[in-house]
Amino acid sequence: MLQEFAKGSAWGEVASAVDALSHAKLSWFNWETKQHEFACVHDEQVQLLSLVGNIALRNGKQRVHAHVVVGHSDGTAHGGPLLEARVGGMCESILTKRYGNAPR
C-alpha cells in the first residue's frame, strides 16, 4: 500500500504508523556487503508498534524506506528494515510533506 502510494506521491515522510499486520518480512543491513539481507517473516497477526521512514528517490524511482518494530502476543518484539507487510484490518499512518529532493 505504501509503495503504491509512493509511486504517485510528492516527496513525503512517513512520520509514524501503528496498528495490526497479518504479515511482515524484515531485513537487516549487512555493513560488509552494503546490502539488506533477509532476517525473518511473521505470517501471523502482529502489532505494528512503530514504523518510521521516508519516501525517497532511488535509481530514479520513488521508494518507501521504512523501519519497523512488531510485537507478538507473548510480549516479544522484532525490528528492522521493512521488506513487505500486509495490513491486518487497519493501519493508522501520518505522512508529512517535505519539500525538496530526498535521494537515497
Image (cartoon, grey):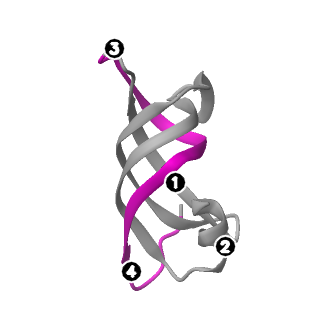
Which residue occupies 56% across, 35% down?
24
- Label 3: how many Cα within 10 Å (few below 14, some 14–19, many 20+): few
**Could you tell which of marks 3 and 2 lies nearer the N-terminus?**
2
Please give the label number shown on residue 7.
2
Residue at left 39%, top 22%?
72
Question: Residue sitting at 53 percent across and 66 percent down?
Answer: 56
Q: Earlier in the sequence, mark 4 or mark 3?
A: 3
Residue under pointer 4: 97
Q: Amino acid at mark 2?
A: Lys
Q: Sequence order check: which comes first, mark 2 or mark 1?
A: 2
> Is 44 left or right of 70, judged from the image as shown?
right
Residue 53 forms part of the magenta stretch: no
Mark closer to the chain start, 4 or 2 = 2
**Which residues fall within the magenta stretch?**
75-103
Q: Which residue is mark 3?
A: 74
Q: Position of residue 45 (x, y in %)?
A: 51, 30
Q: Earlier in the sequence, mark 4 or mark 1?
A: 1
**Is label 3 in contact with label 2 (beta carbons under 8 Å)?**
no
Task: Report which residue position mark 1 lands on.
Answer: 65
Q: Is residue 89 above or below residue 2?
A: above
Q: In whole angstroms, how far apart are the C-alphas of marks 4 and 1?
A: 15 Å
The quadrant where residue 78 appears: top left
